[in-house]
Image: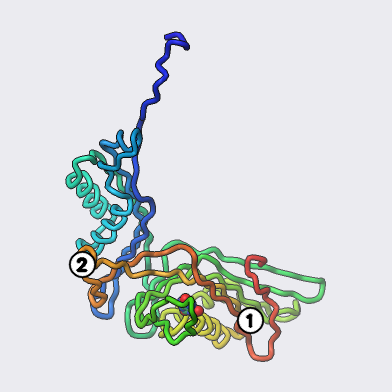
Amino acid sequence: MAVNSRPARAVLGQNQYGKAETRVVRITRDGATHHVRDLNVSVSLSGDMDEVHYSGSNANVLPTDTTKNTVYAFAKKHGIESAEQFGIHLARHFVTSQPSIHRARIRIEEYGWDRIEHGAEGAHSFVRTGQETRLAQITYDGERWEVVSGLKDLTVMNSTNSEFWGYVKDTYTTLPEAYDRVLATDVSGRWRFGWADGEEQAPHWDESYEQVRKHLLQAFAETYSLSLQQTLYAMGARIIDNRPEIDEVRFSLPNKHHFLVDLEPFGLKDDTADSAVYFAADRPYGLIEATILRDGCEERIPADLTNL
Ligand SMILES: O=c1[nH]c(=O)c2[nH]c(=O)[nH]c2[nH]1
């Protein structure tokens, strides 16, 4: 076909739509033993969608907001047995319940959680699977050494034993008081060793790292938390109390908010005694930062850990 005889009309090609990255966390409570399923669900639908593109008629459009609600409602109603089973359930629902939808693609990422081993009662403390990044900074001026070790991206969660209430309330405060909430954070921590004189026996670095990691995880798991600030202090104090080679610890802890999803509009009860479905928000987040020192030691780790 000659270029000047090609039809001038534009036509619609492949198209799909849906809600991407619905972060759904379902916590099931079997007495004091909790179970977590944590998914990132992306729904993509296609079907009779010519009109919405050509004329703007939404008559065939199931809102993406509805697909998000369906993810939360199904998590509550049917549970999450596996990512595959959950995806099959959703895909079948969209295609069979909506005449205008002929194809559904559900993509799911699942984040795994291991239990934190500790000495206290209860099984509601988890560390996300996959390794954190271990960090080290060594400074030497020909005389004195400074070694700061650390870690980042160690994600932990307590599915209970966390409250937040009794805070200042001003004109702009809307936050409801929480008497049983999820407490989750990505731990970023640095700790400075007392060792500075090369003549002295150096600490066993690997063993020290493993022990610090263990102590901070156990303190996170065992602390009944009234604020993330309190938990942060407990983690740092546990390290100072148990590891004589360390003089200073600094933590930067994002408060990874988990909001209970209101399922009442779908006739589902928020029965937290049995199971609960949360929206895992990624931003904005509270950011709680502090240094914990061995009494009498100097504060040397910079306030902004991104500079270290
Ligand atoms: O543990 C918390 N500390 C806060 O300072 C705070 N502020 C807030 O809104 N939620 C929380 N949670």
Kindly identify the residue that appears in the image at 42 percent across and 9 percent down.
1
* Tag 2–tag 1 contact (CB < 8 Å): no
Label 1 is placed on what type of residue?
Glu
| Rendered location of residue 163, percent (x, y) | 40, 82
Mark 1 = which residue? 248
- Furthest-top residue in this view: 2
Mark 2 = which residue? 268
- Above or below: residue 95 compared with residue 223: above
- Above or below: residue 2 compared with residue 251: above
Q: Quadrant of residue 112?
A: bottom left
Tag 1 secondary structure: strand
| N-terminal label among 2 and 1 | 1
Mark 2: is the Cβ under 8 angstroms from ligand 1?
A: no
Kindly identify the residue that appears in the image at 50 percent across and 72 percent down.
286
| Rendered location of residue 247, percent (x, y) | 64, 83
Q: Quadrant of residue 197?
A: bottom right
| Rendered location of residue 21, percent (x, y) | 38, 54
Kindly identify the residue that appears in the image at 26 percent across and 36 percent down.
48
Instruction: Tell me how far mark 2 sits from mark 1, CA to CA.
Output: 48 Å
Tag 2 secondary structure: loop
- Above or below: residue 239 compared with residue 103: below
